[in-house]
Image (tube, grey):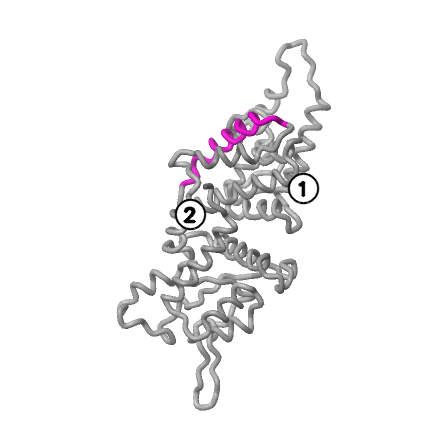
Amino acid sequence: MPRAKIGTGHASRARVDTFLQYWLTRRTQKPIATKHLYDQFLRHVAPVKDHDKIDIAAIMADVKGDSDRFFVMDKPQGAGRLETFFRRLKVMDVSVFYPFLLELTGRKGSPAADCKAIAEYLESYLVRRMVCGEQTRGYGTLVLALLDTIHQVDPEKPAAPSIKTFLAELSEADWWPDDKAFESNWLTRKFYGGLRRERVAMILQAIEEQYHRDSSKSEPIVQFDFSTLQIEHILPQEWEKHWPLAKNDPHGVNRMQHLHGIGNLTLVSHKLNPSLSHAAWLDEDKGGKIKKGKRSALKEHSKLQMNACLISKYSKRWDESKIDERAVELFSVARTIWSSPE
């Protein structure tokens, strides 16, 4: 459906228009405005001299090749690393990188392994900057620089080493955050409410997938429909009734600093009902009748590895100190997924 829309609201455009903009950006290595898009296309393919002929077959072959690759990027299928990257790219809403990815995936010197390596570098760059709250305004210029970098590589040779070096040597405004900055922001920033929910869910899903890769006993990832999972606060947002404050935090300042941090967030298969979501951490004996706690609810409603680890390790208590501990644990996984540029 080439006239189907991409984007929302005023930013929505026909898919074919979006693709043509990406194709022209790749071919010209210049920023292409959406205004008068087809006039720009005609100027690009027009002969340099009046007596020159337009090689329509070559142009159409190039457009067809890129359109096939664009379809894979826009609607990725399968669980391969490259497809996973494309899905995460859409969640981060940085499709401005598509012209570079069209160039990359069409290179003779970039087989699957080279594309996979570059996808991992670029995803690490983008996720680390997202977590660190870095600006995205310069990404359009960055894409043109990436195109220039890849064009300087022998077309028959892999481009991953050059791309990694380029990203690692960017100036401070566009830098690839190192482990120190990544960890500092990971442990202290407000994830829920500070990032879009779909991006928080993407991060948690990536961690869950890494747990699966690290565990030979876990169920295959393909058995889970991650699109149905929802973010759940372990220490609930409505905590007042069952989660008393610590004596050294009578006004709840420390609690509110921890409530929306990554250490207090997980995924559940479907939303817990309020009585379970807001319950105390442990089961309570109410005169011989057991009132189910939050830990039991998570155990009953989730088969995710991250929740199995949570339930097992924190079987006795969940509070601000445990949120800090789990944030550190999750960071060790995140650092594996989105590795350091160093």
SS at circle 2: helix
Q: Is residue 288 left or right of residue 98?
A: left
What residue is drawn where x is 61% and y is 43%? 74
What residue is drawn where x is 62% and y is 13%? 48
Residue 219 position within the rendered picture, expressed as x and y whole percent measured from the top left: 63, 63
Judge the density around disc 1: few (<14), some (14-19), many (≥20) Cα neighbours within 10 Å: few
Q: Is residue 11 left or right of residue 104?
A: left
**Residue that label 1 marks:** 1
Q: Which residue appears farthest toward the top when viewing the image?
A: 51
What is the magenta range? 135-155
Judge the density around disc 2: few (<14), some (14-19), many (≥20) Cα neighbours within 10 Å: some
- Quarter of image, res 18: top right
Question: Which amino acid is tagged 2?
Answer: Asp
- Against 67, residue 271 (above or below) is below
Q: Can residue 98 be seen in this view?
A: yes
SS at circle 1: loop
Residue 238 position within the rendered picture, expressed as x and y whole percent measured from the top left: 39, 69
What residue is drawn where x is 55% and y is 45%? 90
Question: Which amino acid is tagged 1?
Answer: Met
Residue 249 position within the rendered picture, expressed as x and y whole percent measured from the top left: 28, 68
Q: Is residue 227 visible?
A: no
Q: Which residue appears farthest toward the bottom when viewing the image?
A: 287
Which label lies toward us, 2 or 1? 2
**Residue that label 2 marks:** 179
Residue 133 position within the rendered picture, expressed as x and y whole percent measured from the top left: 40, 46
Residue nearest the observer in this picture, 235 or 325: 325
In primary-sequence order, the first of circles 2 and 1 is 1
Does the magenta portion include 145? Answer: yes
Does the magenta portion include 201? Answer: no
What residue is drawn where x is 37% and y is 73%? 243
